[in-house]
Amino acid sequence: MKIDQKINHLPLSKSNPKSLTDLFGHKNVVPMWVADMEFEVAKPIQEALIDRISNSGFGYEYKPDSFLNAQKRWYKNAYNLQLESEHIIYSPSITTSISLIIENTTNKGDGVIIMPPVFMEFRDVIRKTNRKIIKNPLKLENQHYTVDLQDLENKAKLETNRVLILCNPHNPVGRVWRENELKSIINICKKHNVLIISDEIHKDIILFDNAFTSLLHYAEVWQNIVICTSEAKTFNLPGISDSMIIVPDETHRESFKKITRKYNLGATNVLTRVALETAYTMDGTWLKDLIQTIETNVNCIEKELVDSRINLIKPEGTYQVWLDFRDIFEDSKDMFQYITKNSKIGLNAGHWFGREGALFMRMNIASSNEKVLSAIKKVKAAANFI
Ligand SMILES: Cc1ncc(COP(=O)(O)O)c(C=O)c1O
């Protein structure tokens, strides 16, 4: 994969000197925290965007059949799913979608279940919508995370907890939930009438021999399932991508449509439309190369850490690795400060994903093998001083 040489000149969030200083105490850290990639966007997408810009004509657009058909073909080929155009609601971002769904399906003060350590925005969205964060922490045994089903059932059976946000693949721990795990989660939610919002933004980055199963496969088993997804991660388009809410159930769909109409959220962005339609029609080589590159980076990190006290939680999906520092530190903030100061690598502290992530750190490995290897060596050297 080719590294994008131009990104150093762009005002990317991850390199914002103010954010770096606020978070890491110094603007000169190597930013490996925000989840976007350093690889060049696929050539066909770049060319289609250049072509579209040179054609001018930036009036209001709709999503033509060519776009919808490309999207459907993508879902059919990648996931063996028959996507119905009428089931899709477009929204500017997944975080927006989750806020809207929570506001539309629960009341102030109600509980929303999450599985920490997990993408921090879930927590923020629940707080900002004045709902209650209900934690169903993941279990960690022998370096392997699983869902605590008994605890989930205990939380789901409370009348006030009506929504679960599932993250599949799970950011930051990298699990890709297996069919039997998904079925158990669905059985519990069905039994206690809990709506599942399945955030599947990382669905295309599946590593090694793992397989992704969308919750959409179970829409006939449990009608209270809503999928939130986008191609932002897959094709490195988070700056221009919008997102989809896939809602097989008609009652939910009509109700979510009403709210997106109320805030006028489903508009078509001309450039997003072109980028996505092109991405959906590409032959898969770019994505295959990407996955191979990420796998190589994971393998190198695993090898590098063999003789260290940092343990790698090997990811099944996503382009992040979750590093376990529990054998070295006792306090998560000390760990974060010490590793940052001595390695000059800007990683996410695990406790940003909830206190269940304390003594872990997340590293974005969507970069060159050289850069990833150099970063892990610096982190390892910093940890070895302790
Ligand atoms: C699980 C998950 N959901 C959602 C997002 C962000 O999506 P959006 O920018 O569309 O809100 C991220 C970004 O890292 C993520 O990891």
Image (cartoon, helix red, strand yellow):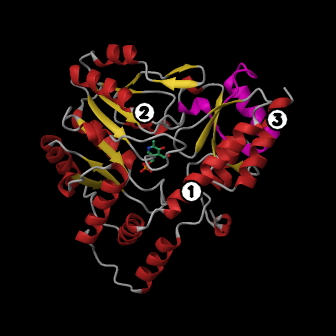
- Secondary structure of the residue carrying tag 2 is loop
- Mark 1 residue element: helix
The amino acid beneath tag 1 is Leu
What is the C-alpha distance between the residues marked 3 and 2? 33 Å
- Of pointers 1 and 2, the one earlier in the residue sequence: 2
Residue ID at (74%, 22%): 329
Per the image, label 3 sits on a secondary structure element best described as helix
Is 265 drawn above or below residue 381 in the view shown?
below
Quadrant in the rendering for residue 163: top left
Give residue 373's position: percent from left, percent from top: 75, 47
User: Which three-letter amino acid code belongs to the residue tagged 2?
Assistant: Trp
Q: CA distance from mark 1 to mark 2?
A: 21 Å
Q: Which residue is mark 2?
A: 177
Q: Which residue is mark 3?
A: 382
The circle drawn on residue 68 is none
Q: Given the current orientation, which residue lies at the most extreme front position?
A: 209
Pinpoint residue 49: horizontal percent, then vertical percent. Answer: 45, 76
* Mark in the foreground, 3 or 2: 2
In screen coordinates, is 240 left or right of 2? left
Kind of residue at badge 3 = Ala
Residue 296 in sight from this viewpoint: yes
Q: Is residue 220 left or right of residue 277?
A: left
Q: Residue at x 80, y 42 (%)?
A: 377
Q: Which residues are magenta?
A: 324-353
Residue at numbered disc 1:
290
Height in image: 160 above or below 6?
above
